[in-house]
Amino acid sequence: MSHSTQAVVSTESGSRYLQQLAKHWAHKFATEFDASQAKIVNENGNGVTMTATADSLTVIAFAADAETLPKWRQVVEDHIVRFAFRETLEFDWQPA
């Protein structure tokens, strides 16, 4: 069973961020993406799906077990925040 959490982040650059994350991790994780959505899964079964609209980025982080989810969610958030250095993003994580 997979455990997941999601955040809807206000940004006009969601497409850019999801593509940057997918390209950044493509060399080591299973990655599928286009301009509006992405799915990335690592070797442990932890992953993230993202969907970009004109004014938001929906991020769903999932993990194989509940103990791993908070750490994995933070890894995903930290990477996106680094790509978004031109703006301040707010992640309000909720159960998915």
Image (tube, rainbow, N blue to C red):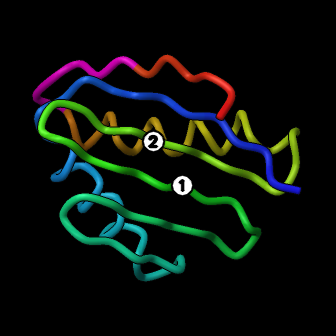
Please tell me whether residue 86 is drawn above or below residue 73 in the rendered image.
above
Alpha carbon distance from label 1 to label 2: 7 Å
Q: Quadrant of the N terminus?
A: bottom right
Binning the other alpha carbons within 10 Å of mark 1 as few (below 14), some (14 to 19) or many (20 upward) gives: many
Q: Residue at x 40, y 77 (%)?
A: 32
Q: Is residue 2 left or right of residue 49?
A: right
Q: Quadrant of the C terminus?
A: top right
Q: Amino acid at mark 1?
A: Val
Binning the other alpha carbons within 10 Å of mark 2 as few (below 14), some (14 to 19) or many (20 upward) gives: many
Please tell me whether residue 49 is drawn above or below residue 41 in the rendered image.
above
Q: What residue is pinned by disc 1? A: 48
Q: Residue at x 20, y 42 (%)?
A: 53
Q: Residue at x 61, y 59 (%)?
A: 47
Q: Residue at x 87, y 40 (%)?
A: 66
Magenta-colored stretch includes residue 39: no
Q: Is residue 22 left or right of residue 29?
A: left
Q: Position of residue 76 (x, y in %)?
A: 50, 45
Tell which circle, 1 or 2, labels the residue nearer the N-terminal end: 1
- Predominant secondary structure in magenta? loop
Q: Position of residue 28 (x, y in %)?
A: 51, 79
Please tell me whether residue 54 is drawn above or below residue 46 in the rendered image.
above
Q: How many marks?
A: 2
In the image, the segment drawn in magenta is 85-90
The mark found on residue 10 in the picture is none
Q: Is residue 82 left or right of residue 38?
A: left
1 and 2 marks in contact (CB < 8 Å): yes
Q: Position of residue 58 (x, y in %)?
A: 39, 39
Q: Secondary structure at mark 1?
A: strand
The mark found on residue 59 in the picture is 2
Q: Amino acid at mark 2?
A: Val
Q: Secondary structure at mark 2?
A: strand
